[in-house]
C-alpha cells in the first residue's frame, strides 16, 4: 500500500480511466492490472478477517457486471486458494460479462450465484466479511432494483453484526469524483483503490462511507500523470512544502513581514486577538491589531508581542495603508456585518500598493464576507481590480450567503472552484473536508482534520495563520493549503479538550517537526 502523502494527486473518474488506458497502451494488458487489483483486495481481506482467523473463515463476494466485478472474481479465486470459504453473487448474467471481467470470471472455479441468492439471511449470518465489488467510482445513475436492495441489506448486516465490508475502488453507490451518494451507498469498513485516490474518497460524505482507504500499487506507470496533469490534491506538505517560508540566519522581523488584523468594537475584540496570535505563531515578523478607538484600552491591556494601530473610519484605514511595509491585512473576525465593514474592505482593496511591483495580500473572513451577501459582484470587481492576492475563507453558511445564488449545485470541490473563478480570489471552503481552490482550478482537499477544531474561534485563528504565511510572501494558494494543514496538525497535537486559544500555542512543535522532516 502507498502512503497518501507521497502520492497526493486526486484523479477524477475520467482521469483514472485515462491512466488505465495509457498503461494498457504502453504494454500492460488489462487482465494483468485486474489480477493485481484482485490480489490487493484479497490481501486486505485477509487483514480484515478477525484475528485469530476463524477455523473456517467465510467471505461473501458480491460482484457487478463491469470491471469492478472482475476484480471481485479475482479476489474470490485467490482467497479460495488460501482456504477461505467463498460465496459469490453476481448482479446480472455471467454470459453478459465482457472483456477482462469475463476472463476473470472464467478463471473462477467456484459456484456463481445470483446476487440476491447470496444475500439471504442464512448466507449473511455465516459471513465473516463481505467484499463489495458491485460498482466502481464511475457510477452514472442512482442505484435501483436489486442493486439498491443489496446495498441496504448489506448496510443493515454490517450495522447489526459489526462485521466489516471491504469496498473495491469505492463503496458501491458512491461517486468517485464528487463524494456524492447515488441514491444509497455501501458503508465500508475499508476501501482499496488503485494507483491514486479520487476526490470522492476525501469529500464528505464519501470519506465517511469509505472507512480507511488504502491505495494499491498495481503497476500503473506514474509517468501517465504528465499526460493527465491532475489539478486536485490531498492537502499535505508534499503539495506546498517547497514554498513554505523558513526563517534564515540573515533574516530579521521586517523580512518576515508585518501582518495587520482588524478588530471589532469594544465587546467584540477577542476574535481579532485570536487571529493576531495565529499570524504571529504562523511566522509573521510583526503583527498589529487595527483597532477602533473605543477598543484600544481593551487590546492594550491584553497584548504583549502584538502591537496596536488606531483606525475608526475608512479614511483612517486608507491613511494607514500608505505604509508600504505592511504585508497583509486580515479582515472580518467580529468586525461587524454591514455598510461600515463593506466600505473598509473596499477601501483596503482599492488602496495604495507597496512599490516595486510588490502586492499586499488580504484575508477576508467571517463578517467581511457576510457584509457582501447581497452584492457579490461589487466584491469580485474590487478583488480583480486590486491586482492583489486575496483569500476568502467561508464556512458552509457563509459560503451559501455569499455564493449560493451564483455558483451551480455540485460537490464542495466543484462549488469552491466556481467561487474562486467568479471572485478572482483563492477560496477556502471550510469544514471537515476543507477545500482550497484557486481561480485557475488548482485545489486541495483536507483529509485528516480532527473533530476538536469544531470550537468557537477556531476559524479566527486559521485566518490569522493564513495571514502569517502570506506576510512571508508565500503564494496564496500554497499559503492557504499550508495553513489548513498546520491548523489541523496543531489541534491534533493538543487533542480532546481543545479551545481556540490552544491552537497557536501548539504550532511550534508542529513547525519543528515539519522543518526537521525537510517540510515536503
Image: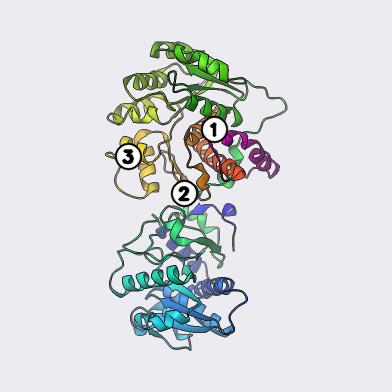
Quarter in which the N terminus is drawn: bottom right
Extreme residue in the right direction: 249
Which mark, by number, is residue 400? 3
Element type where label 2 sits in the image: strand
Element type where label 1 sits in the image: helix
Which mark, by number, is residue 56? none
Position of residue 427 measured from the top left corner of the image (x, y, whole percent): 42, 37
Query: How many badges with numbers are in the image?
Result: 3
Q: Earlier in the sequence, mark 2 or mark 3?
A: 2
Q: Residue at x 43, y 72 (%)?
A: 133
Q: Give the answer, above or below, for where 46 lies relative to 194.
A: below
Q: Give the answer, above or below, for where 483 lies relative to 318.
A: below
Position of residue 257 measured from the top left corner of the image (x, y, whole percent): 58, 23
Q: Are marks 1 and 3 in contact (CB under 8 Å)?
A: no
Q: Are marks 2 and 1 in contact (CB under 8 Å)?
A: no
Distance from Cα at disc 2 to Cα at disc 3 = 23 Å
Q: Are marks 2 and 3 in contact (CB under 8 Å)?
A: no
Quarter in which the C terminus is drawn: top right
Can residue 100 be seen here? The reply is no
Which mark, by number, is residue 232? 2
Position of residue 59 measured from the top left corner of the image (x, y, whole percent): 50, 79
Q: Earlier in the sequence, mark 2 or mark 1?
A: 2
Label 1 neighbourhood size at 10 Å, few (<14), some (14-19), many (20+)? many
Position of residue 511 measured from the top left corner of the image (x, y, whole percent): 64, 38
Q: Give the answer, above or below, for where 199 lies relative to 140.
A: above
Q: Which residue is mark 1?
A: 465
Is residue 284 covered in magenta?
A: no
Front-most of residues 420 and 290: 290
Q: Residue at x 33, y 49 (%)?
A: 410
In the rendered structure, which segment of residues is drawn in magenta?
A: 496-520
Element type where label 3 sits in the image: helix
Label 2 neighbourhood size at 10 Å, few (<14), some (14-19), many (20+)? many
Amino acid at each position: 500500500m502507498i502512503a497518501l502523502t507521497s502520492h497526493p494527486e486526486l484523479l477524477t473518474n475520467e482521469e483514472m480511466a485515462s491512466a488505465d488506458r495509457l498503461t494498457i497502451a504502453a504494454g500492460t494488458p488489462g487482465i494483468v492490472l485486474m489480477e493485481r487489483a484482485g490480489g490487493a483486495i484479497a490481501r486486505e481481506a485477509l487483514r480484515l478477517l478477525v484475528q485469530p482467523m476463524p477455523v473456517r473463515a467465510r467471505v461473501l463476494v458480491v460482484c457487478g457486471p463491469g470491471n469492478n466485478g472482475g476484480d471481485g472474481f479475482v479476489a474470490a479465486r485467490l482467497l479460495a486458494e488460501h482456504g477461505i470459504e467463498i460465496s459469490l453473487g453476481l448482479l446480472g448474467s455471467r454470459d453478459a460479462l465482457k472483456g477482462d471481467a469475463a476472463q476473470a470470471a472464467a478463471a473462477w472455479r467456484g459456484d456463481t450465484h445470483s446476487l440476491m441468492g447470496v444475500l439471504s439471511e442464512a448466507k449473511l449470518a455465516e459471513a465473516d466479511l463481505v467484499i463489495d465489488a458491485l460498482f466502481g467510482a464511475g457510477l452514472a445513475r442512482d442505484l435501483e432494483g436489486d442493486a439498491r436492495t443489496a446495498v441496504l441489506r448489506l448496510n443493515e448486516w454490517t450495522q447489526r453484526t459489526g462485521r466489516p465490508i471491504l469496498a473495491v475502488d469505492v463503496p458501491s453507490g458512491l461517486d468517485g469524483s464528487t463524494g456524492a451518494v447515488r441514491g444509497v451507498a455501501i458503508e465500508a469498513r475499508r476501501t482499496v483503490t488503485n494507483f491514486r485516490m479520487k476526490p470522492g474518497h476525501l469529500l464528505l460524505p464519501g470519506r465517511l462511507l469509505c472507512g480507511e482507504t488504502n491505495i494499491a500499487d498495481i503497476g500503473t506507470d506514474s509517468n501517465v500523470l504528465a499526460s493527465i496533469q491532475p489539478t486536485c490534491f490531498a492537502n499535505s506538505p508534499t503539495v506546498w512544502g517547497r514554498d513554505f517560508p523558513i526563517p534564515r540566519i540573515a533574516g530579521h522581523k521586517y523580512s518576515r513581514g508585518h501582518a495587520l488584523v482588524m478588530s471589532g468594537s469594544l465587546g467584540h475584540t477577542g476574535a481579532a486577538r485570536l487571529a493576531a496570535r495565529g499570524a504571529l505563531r504562523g511566522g509573521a515578523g510583526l503583527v498589529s491589531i487595527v483597532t477602533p478607538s473605543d477598543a484600544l484600552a481593551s487590546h492594550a491591556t491584553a497584548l504583549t508581542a502584538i502591537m496596536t494601530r488606531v483606525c475608526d473610519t475608512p479614511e483612517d484605514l486608507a491613511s494607514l495603508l500608505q505604509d508600504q511595509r505592511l504585508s497583509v491585512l486580515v479582515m472580518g473576525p467580529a468586525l461587524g456585518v454591514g455598510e461600515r465593514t463593506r466600505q473598509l474592505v473596499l477601501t483596503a482593496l482599492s488602496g495604495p500598493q507597496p512599490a516595486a511591483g510588490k502586492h499586499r495580500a488580504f484575508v477576508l473572513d467571517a463578517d467581511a464576507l457576510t457584509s457582501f451577501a447581497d452584492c457579490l459582484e461589487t466584491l469580485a470587481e474590487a478583488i480583480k481590480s486590486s491586482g492583489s492576492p486575496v483569500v476568502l475563507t467561508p464556512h458552509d453558511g457563509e459560503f451559501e450567503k455569499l455564493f449560493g445564488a451564483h455558483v451551480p449545485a455540485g460537490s464542495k470541490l466543484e462549488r469552491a472552484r466556481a467561487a474562486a473563478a467568479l471572485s478572482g480570489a483563492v477560496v477556502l471552503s471550510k469544514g471537515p473536508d476543507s477545500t482550497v481552490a484557486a481561480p485557475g482550478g488548482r485545489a486541495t482537499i483536507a483529509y485528516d482534520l480532527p473533530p476538536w477544531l469544531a470550537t468557537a474561534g477556531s476559524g479566527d485563528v486559521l485566518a490569522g495563520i493564513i495571514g502569517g504565511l502570506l506576510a512571508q510572501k508565500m503564494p496564496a494558494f500554497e499559503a492557504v493549503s499550508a495553513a489548513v494543514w498546520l491548523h489541523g496538525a496543531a489541534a491534533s497535537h493538543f487533542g480532546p479538550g481543545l479551545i481556540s486559544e490552544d491552537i497557536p500555542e501548539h504550532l511550534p512543535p508542529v513547525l519543528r517537526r515539519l522543518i526537521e522532516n525537510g517540510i515536503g
